[in-house]
Amino acid sequence: MRLTGRALRLTVFIGESDQWHHRPLTSEIVHRAHRAGLAGASVFHGVEGFGASSIVHTTRLLSLSQDLPAAVVIVDDEPRIRAFLPQLDELVTEGLVILDEVEVIRYVGRQAGR
């Protein structure tokens, strides 16, 4: 797949402990993005943050959190990202979903067999 020029970055901010049918929600989003043929998805785990609940979750020793922040980031062309949004409506019951316009400079995958 080639991806250059204008694209959309979809970022889903959720809690690390959020689940979808006894499976990590981050994993479910990544696997659905893969099945949808999107260019790629990455999960980033945070060390501290808060959201709509206003509860600060942190890795600091005295207040070890069970629900650290996580972000799933997906970049692809606009039609593919927008077609994927209804799946997030089903999956994300708490969290923040944002879209940013981005410019892809280089997108190169590994060749098979390497």
Image: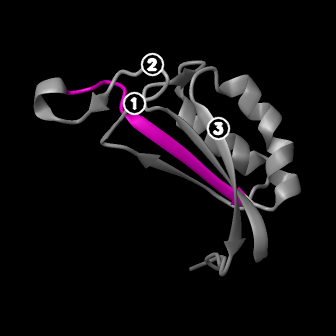
> Hey, which quadrant is residue 62 in on the image?
top left
Residue 9, disc: none
Residue on which disc 2 sits: 53
Mark 1–mark 2 distance (CA, rounded to whole Å): 7 Å
Classify 70 as above or below 34: above
On the rendered structure, is 114 left or right of 101? left
Q: What span is in magenta?
A: 64-75
Percent from the top left, x then y, of residue 57? 31, 29
Instruction: Give the crowd class for mark 3: few <14, some 14-19, many >=20 residues within 10 Å.
Output: some
On the rendered structure, is 70 left or right of 42? left
At horizontal 63% and vertical 20% (from top left) the residue drawn is 93
At horizontal 57% and vertical 28% (from top left) the residue drawn is 95
Contact, CB < 8 Å: mark 3 with mark 2? no
Residue 16 forms part of the magenta stretch: no
Residue 97, disc: 3
On the rendered structure, is 30 left or right of 68? right
Instruction: Give the crowd class for mark 2: few <14, some 14-19, many >=20 residues within 10 Å.
Output: few
Label 2 sits on what residue type? Answer: Ser
Label 3 sits on what residue type? Answer: Val
Report helix, strand or loop for mark 2: loop
Q: Which circle's residue, 3 or 2, is located before the other in the chain?
A: 2
> Hey, which quadrant is residue 112 in on the image?
bottom right
Residue on which disc 1 sits: 50
Report helix, strand or loop for mark 3: strand
Mark 3–mark 2 distance (CA, rounded to whole Å): 16 Å
> Hey, which quadrant is residue 83 in on the image?
top right
At horizontal 79% and vertical 38% (from top left) the residue drawn is 85
Percent from the top left, x then y, of residue 54? 40, 22
Instruction: Give the crowd class for mark 1: few <14, some 14-19, many >=20 residues within 10 Å.
Output: some
How many discs mark residues in the rendered view? 3
Determine if residue 3 is in view: no
Contact, CB < 8 Å: mark 1 with mark 2? yes
